[in-house]
Image (spheres, grey):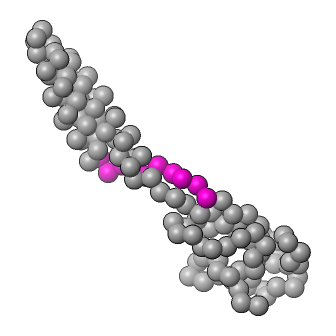
């Protein structure tokens, strides 16, 4: 931990023991799936209309809905910063934020509003 001794920090402080940045798929609202289902149903209907096959319309709608849902999740991708803090009592806790907390391994932190922030020594 970059030479910081836990015993030397304030009782409510901790030391950053790990930091990670992850890119995660966003949550789908259903809009992408609905739009994809409509477009897929239209395309499927046009493909199947020569034979009068309604199954092509249904398959097109289902496939379009699944594709639209997956596309919406990728478009709404989020970046998450995970910071693990080791506290004076030896316990650890990981905090996730959607903005860069500007913390590095070895930084001494205190808790503010439920998140670790650099502690002014």
Confirm whether residue 119 shows in the render. yes
Task: Please name whichever residue, 25 or 58, is drawn nearer the observer in this view of the structure.
Answer: 25
Give the mark count.
0
Which corner quadrant of the image does residue 117 belong to?
bottom right
Taking the image as shown, residue 52 lies to the left or right of residue 31, namely: left
Q: Is residue 46 above or below residue 25?
A: above
Q: What residue do we see at 54% from left, 53% from top? A: 23
Residue lying farthest to the bottom in this orientation: 121
Quadrant in the picture for the N terminus: bottom right
Quadrant in the picture for the C terminus: bottom right
Residue 95: percent from left, percent from top = 62, 67
Q: What residue do we see at 60% from left, 76% from top? A: 115
Residue 108: percent from left, percent from top = 75, 80
Which corner quadrant of the image does residue 55 belong to?
top left
Task: Please name whichever residue, 21 or 94, is drawn nearer the observer in this view of the structure.
Answer: 21
Taking the image as shown, residue 55 lies to the left or right of residue 25, namely: left
Our reading of the magenta stretch's main secondary structure is loop
Q: Is residue 59 above or below residue 93?
A: above
Residue 93: percent from left, percent from top = 69, 67
Task: Please name whichever residue, 5 or 120, is drawn nearer the observer in this view of the structure.
Answer: 120
Q: What residue do we see at 71% from left, 80% from top? A: 109
- Which residues are drawn in magenta? 21-30
Q: What residue do we see at 55% from left, 60% from top? A: 80
Taking the image as shown, residue 115 lies to the left or right of residue 53, namely: right
Confirm whether residue 27 shows in the render. no
Please say whether residue 11 is one of the residues in the magenta stretch. no
């Amino acid at each position: 931990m970059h030479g910081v001794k836990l015993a030397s920090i304030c009782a409510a402080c901790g030391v950053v023991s790990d930091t990670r940045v992850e890119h995660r798929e966003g949550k789908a609202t259903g809009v992408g799936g609905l739009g994809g289902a409509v477009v897929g149903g239209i395309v499927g209907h046009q493909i199947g209309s020569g034979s009068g096959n309604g199954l092509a319309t249904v398959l097109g709608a289902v496939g379009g809905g699944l594709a639209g849902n997956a596309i919406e999740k990728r478009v709404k991708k989020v970046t998450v910063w995970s910071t693990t803090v080791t506290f004076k009592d030896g316990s650890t806790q990981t905090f996730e934020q959607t903005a860069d907390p500007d913390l590095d391994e070895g930084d001494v932190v205190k808790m503010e509003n439920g998140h670790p922030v650099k502690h002014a020594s």
